[in-house]
Image: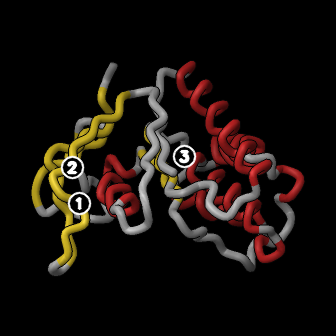
């Protein structure tokens, strides 16, 4: 099976503090891969290094066989941050529309991807509501919808179910399994964090 995320002897630090030391990992196409550890262990730092937001001091990190950071590869990565980055004065549909435009989705494809993403996270009935009126769980689901909008080859979620009640948490993991099965059918890949 093809490796889509490969880290070798990765070292990442800030100022005088080493965060990741000699870390190696390999994630293959079709795998759901989770990182578990206490706060401050470096999970988010690793995620940011994988997606190209942080740069390694030494060692290497490759995504889809390209060294990171790489702007062209970043277009093939769906990313859901630890904190929701939503426009609360806009509706859910307006948020999806805005982010779809950032992903350069247009016309019928844009409409289909927005419908797919909203349906995946069960937000279709709430698309006309302002995000300011959403619960924390609804905001996390909208953030997930935004991450899957571009139909990425790699999907990285940083703590996607933090602060979500157990029933909704189960629903989100079921949605991720549904997405994985769909992507496997398309011979594509998704990786998950959280």
Q: Which residue is mark 1?
A: 20
In the image, what residue occupies the spot 19% across and 69% down?
18
Tag nearer the camera, 3 or 1: 1
For label 2, the SS is strand
SS at mark 1 in the image:
strand
| Residue nearer the viewer, 104 or 181 | 181
Where 130 sits versus 103, above or below? Answer: below
Whole-percent x, y for residue 144 in the image: 62, 53
What's the distance in space between the residues labelled 1 and 2, CA to CA?
Answer: 6 Å
* Left or right: where 89 falls relative to 10: right
Image quadrant in which the N terminus is located? top left
| Residue at the image position 85 percent from the left and 67 percent from the top | 129
Measured as percent of width and height from the top left, residue 124 is found at: 83, 50
Query: Is residue 160 something one can see in this rendering?
Result: yes
Q: Nearer the viewer, mark 2 or mark 3?
A: 2
Residue labelled with disc 2: 23
Residue 150 - label = 3
């Amino acid at each position: 099976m093809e490796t889509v995320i490969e880290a070798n002897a990765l070292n990442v630090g800030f100022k005088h503090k080493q965060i990741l030391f000699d870390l190696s990992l390999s994630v293959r196409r079709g795998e759901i891969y989770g990182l578990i550890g206490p706060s401050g262990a470096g999970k988010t730092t690793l995620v940011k290094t994988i997606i190209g937001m942080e740069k390694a001091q030494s060692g290497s990190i490759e995504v889809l066989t390209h060294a990171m950071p790489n702007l062209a590869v970043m277009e093939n990565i769906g990313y859901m941050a630890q904190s929701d980055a939503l426009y609360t004065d806009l509706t859910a549909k307006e948020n999806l529309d805005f982010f779809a435009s950032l992903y350069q989705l247009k016309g019928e494809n844009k409409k289909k991807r927005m419908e797919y993403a909203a349906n995946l996270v069960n937000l279709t009935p709430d698309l006309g509501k302002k995000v300011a009126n959403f619960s924390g769980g609804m905001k996390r689901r909208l953030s997930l919808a935004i991450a899957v909008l571009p139909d990425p080859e790699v999907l990285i979620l940083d703590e996607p179910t933090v602060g979500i009640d157990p029933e909704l948490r189960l629903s989100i993991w079921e949605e991720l399994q549904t997405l994985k099965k769909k992507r496997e059918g398309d011979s594509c890949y998704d990786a998950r964090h959280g």
